Image (spheres, coloured by chain):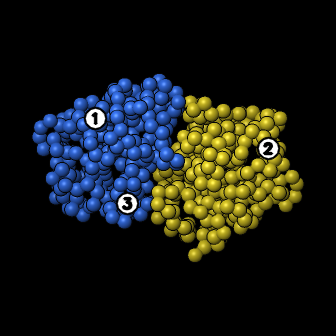
Chain colours: A yellow, B blue
């Protein structure tokens, strides 16, 4: 049985449905999504070897998932640093940042390419929570330079929901410095996106909150999660479009 | 090293601090607390043997933790039923109930002692999320009769934060039908409460969200959580008052 992919527009509709008819708050969904991300990081990159994690957060909900993941990673014993050059203004994001402050997790809120290069050198892993399912190119700075520096550094990368810069329905950039951006690990949230068919690395699914009602409405086929895990390994599993 | 207990008034202050200076929303905290509860249930009462779980929810936040736990338990493969005879009116509680509706989890919203007795007979486990750290006796009906029926049924019980009817700072009821209420498992949230010193059963701690700032402010000594677990086994560990 293949796993359903959600196109950019279907993912947007499902997200809206979760928060309207589904009655989830964004706080709840972001907490569970970020928790999934933290579990995928722990599974692939244990703190004994990858303590120094650089979490690059974009300005939207994908970035918020990264902020939540950073907090959980600290609780697991990592020493995360958050790079958040375009901090969002809604209160939720400010609260998530305050929660990081209270754990002494550094949150860098402006871009400086030298500083970023230094942070990359000091890190063992990048969590790419820059762009999610609502991304549409082109990639604008500072995120273009940030992603190019990540590619050049050859550091391990775990991407959240989609590799940032990949078109959600189409796949990797076809030209330019980001055409070689190919993360080592991907955690898709709720369901994989169509661009996942171009992805050959380690692949997790997270976001264990899909209801029976939504599964039916969106005609989803999703794999079971084992035990109490908030992630399931779907590496190389067949995908289908819905 | 002993584990700090939080008196009723200190627990109230810590909760307020988490949501003011700590910048957590109640949605976030309840999600993480309910997730901890679900993990303790899974650890002690696996779904292969305890699929039929009756989750008894009180009118306050402790009941909300139970509503969240019910959803996660369903995701783990349990068949939960929620008994919620005094449903709370704030929107958060209505949303948590809608999330259960969308999983076809029965939520019973009025009390009938015959119906409750039948549900007890059909269940393998009761999750007692009736009263938490803000409880002050006497126990009022319907919760007095509900707890008495649970005691009489001799069903396994896991209590959330404190055994319901126990005075938070003082311990079990000294007389009446509830003086024998002694759950098999207790999951304390954030930190144990002073009544825990009268408790001799299996004991977990959950609520892995305490910040460095709060640990310091409340002079807490808490055990480390293993790996990515949202609970830690503290059975028979020495407790100290703060």
Residue bearing the label numbered 3: B46
Residue bearing the label numbered 1: B197
Q: Circle 3 — which element?
A: loop
Foreground: A199 or A156? A156
Q: Quadrant of the N terminus of chain A?
A: bottom right
The residue that appears at 44% across and 49% down in the rendered structure is B35
Residue B114 rendering spot, x and y as whole percentages:
16, 58
Question: The disc numbered 3 marks a residue on which chain?
Answer: B
Foreground: A25 or A84? A84
Pointers 1 and 2 within a single chain: no
Residue A189 rendering spot, x and y as whole percentages:
60, 57
Q: Nearer the viewer, mark 1 or mark 2?
A: 1
The residue that appears at 39% across and 54% down in the rendered structure is B43
Residue bearing the label numbered 2: A146
Q: Circle 1 — which element?
A: helix
Question: The disc numbered 2 marks a residue on which chain?
Answer: A
The residue that appears at 27% across and 49% down in the rendered structure is B184
Q: Nearer the viewer, mark 3 or mark 1?
A: 1
Is B136 displayed left or right of B96 in the figure? left
Residue B115 rendering spot, x and y as whole percentages:
20, 59
Q: Looking at this rendering, what residue extends furthest in the right direction?
A: A176
Task: Looking at the image, tell me whether mark 3 or mark 1 is earlier in sequence order.
Answer: 3
Q: Circle 2 — which element?
A: helix
Residue B47 rendering spot, x and y as whole percentages:
37, 62
Q: Residues within 10 Å of mark 3 (few under 14, many from 20)?
A: some
What is the C-alpha distance between the residues marked 2 and 3? 46 Å
Q: Are marks 2 and 3 in contact (CB under 8 Å)?
A: no
Is B41 displayed left or right of A176 in the figure? left
Q: Residues within 10 Å of mark 2 (few under 14, many from 20)?
A: many
What is the C-alpha distance between the residues marked 3 and 1? 27 Å
Question: The disc numbered 1 marks a residue on which chain?
Answer: B
The residue that appears at 79% across and 36% down in the rendered structure is A118
């Amino acid at each position: 049985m293949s796993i359903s992919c959600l196109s950019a527009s279907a993912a947007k509709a499902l997200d809206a449905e979760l928060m309207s008819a589904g009655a989830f708050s964004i706080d709840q969904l972001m907490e569970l999504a970020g928790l999934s991300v933290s579990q995928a990081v722990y599974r692939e990159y244990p703190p004994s070897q990858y303590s120094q994690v650089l979490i690059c957060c974009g300005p939207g909900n994908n970035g918020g998932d990264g902020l939540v993941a950073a907090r959980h990673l600290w609780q697991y014993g990592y020493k995360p640093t958050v790079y958040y050059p375009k901090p969002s203004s809604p209160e939720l994001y400010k609260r998530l940042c305050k929660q990081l402050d209270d754990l002494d997790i550094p949150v860098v809120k402006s871009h400086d390419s030298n500083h970023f290069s230094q942070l990359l050198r000091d890190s063992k892993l990048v969590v790419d929570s820059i762009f999610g399912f609502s991304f549409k190119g082109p990639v604008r700075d500072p995120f273009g330079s940030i992603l190019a520096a990540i590619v050049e550094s050859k550091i391990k990368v775990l991407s959240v929901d989609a590799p940032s810069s990949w078109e959600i329905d189409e796949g990797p950039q076809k030209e330019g410095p980001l055409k070689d951006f190919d993360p080592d690990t991907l955690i898709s949230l709720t369901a994989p996106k169509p661009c996942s068919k171009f992805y050959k690395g380690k692949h997790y699914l997270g976001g264990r909150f899909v209801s029976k009602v939504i599964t039916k409405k969106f005609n989803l086929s999703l794999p079971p999660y084992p035990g109490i895990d908030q992630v399931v390994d779907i590496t190389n599993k067949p995908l289908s479009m819905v």
